[in-house]
Amino acid sequence: MSDRDFPYSIWPTGPQFLISLTNSKSLFLSFSIRYLNTFSCSGSVSQSVCMDSLGILITRPLFPYLEQQLLRRGCCLFRLYDSPEDRRIQFLRENSGSIRAVIGNTFVEVDAAMIDALPELKIVASFSVGLDMVDLQKCEERGIRVTNTPDVLTDDVADLAVGLAMAVLRRIPSADLFVRSNGWKNGDFTLTTKFSGKRVGILGLGRIGLSIAKRVESFNCPIHYHSRSIKPFSNYTYHSNPLLLASNSDILIISCSLTAQTRHIVNRAVIDALGPHGILINIGRGAHVDEAELVKALREGRIGGAGLDVFEDEPNVREELVGLDNVVLTPHVGSDTVETSREMADLVVGNLEAWVLNEPLLTPVV
């Protein structure tokens, strides 16, 4: 007789008694009482906190894994996006007594009007690191907690910044189209510009900015930066304003937070300082750049090219940008990998669980 002859284990719901039959010579009964954090609200065993009937407002479709985790814990999801736009305030009012949490994102504002319509709102758990879509002052006034998802998305966003720079300089999308359209049969593709050794200017040397710097150092790129304070990196050159930074950069990468002070921080003067061979990369927020001025500069040849993951009026993108072959466009996907999205979702759920248990939040902002 072997272990396989008696592969029995009994796991009742509740404190668990494990009955194991091991082999013919040794038959014993062992009781193992294991503490379960809770049961899922559907009655199945779960190692997670039960948030039975916690009303959560969802303003746009969630990453499926995140929705599954919330439903497993018994949360009640109120899907604002299922309501016509002209009825959304009414939807909020009709469900205001039940909604105590909002999942924030980079597309729909949690503004004063929404907050005022939700008198029972206690926490905004943002599925992003940026908080420009949340009225933080209003939340603070109301005593509403706010969390975000820092750190876990840093690598992905930095990777995309470098990828966009390479795609613009080496014209990778155009080269791909050249092959697919059989253009290669008629001659060679045009010469492009190298990435290695270019002076890289980083506007905002925070977590993401520093991660970008570490990556491009391996390409022998001198690092220049502008930030709110001088950083302790002697091999990086600090510039006191964006204009000076652009003047000393071949590639300018925007990675700062969006605030009232940084809105249109890249204006006509900064674009012109970057020059006709310069490349602008934006993985921050669309409103960091005066988009109308950028379009003019690209069309007039006052700047060499741009790689944009974010736009002023997402998901609407200016037709002028779409028609330019010296621009690479991506649909705000800086952190959109399966691995990072799961980590972000876990942080959102972890913050909500901490709030339910009245424990310290994992990544508090307010």
Image (cartoon, rainbow, N blue to C red):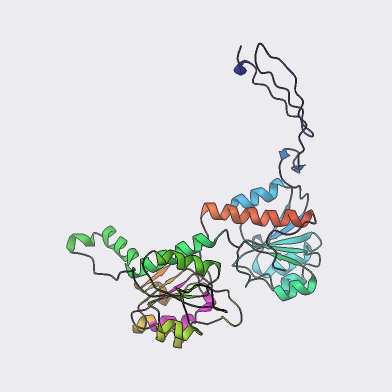
Tell me if residue 225 can be seen. yes
Q: Of all residues shown, which one is farthest toward the front?
A: 234
Residue occupying the point 79% across, 53% down: 357
Quadrant placement of the N terminus: top right
Q: Nearer the viewer, residue 146 or 51?
A: 146
Residue 114 is a magenta residue: no
Q: Nearer the viewer, residue 159 or 135?
A: 159
Residue occupying the point 69% across, 24% down: 9
Q: Which residues are magenta?
A: 280-297
Lateral position of residue 211 relative to residue 151, left or right: left
Instruction: Indicate the position of residue 98 as horizontal and vertical percent values.
Output: 79, 59
Lateral position of residue 123 relative to residue 233, left or right: right
Residue occupying the point 62% across, 64% down: 105
Q: Of all residues shown, which one is farthest toward the bottom?
A: 269
Residue occupying the point 79% across, 72% down: 142
Instruction: Look at the picture and state if 46 lies above or below 134.
Output: above
Q: Nearer the viewer, residue 177 or 8?
A: 8
Instruction: Indicate the position of residue 5 as horizontal and vertical percent values.
Output: 62, 15
Instruction: Look at the picture and state if 272 lies above or below 48.
Output: below
Residue 289 is a magenta residue: yes
Quadrant placement of the C terminus: bottom right
Q: Quadrant of residue 41?
A: top right
Instruction: Look at the picture and state if 226 lies above or below 41.
Output: below
Instruction: Indicate the position of residue 7 as horizontal and vertical percent values.
Output: 64, 21
Q: Quadrant of residue 328?
A: bottom left
Tell me if residue 267 can be seen. no
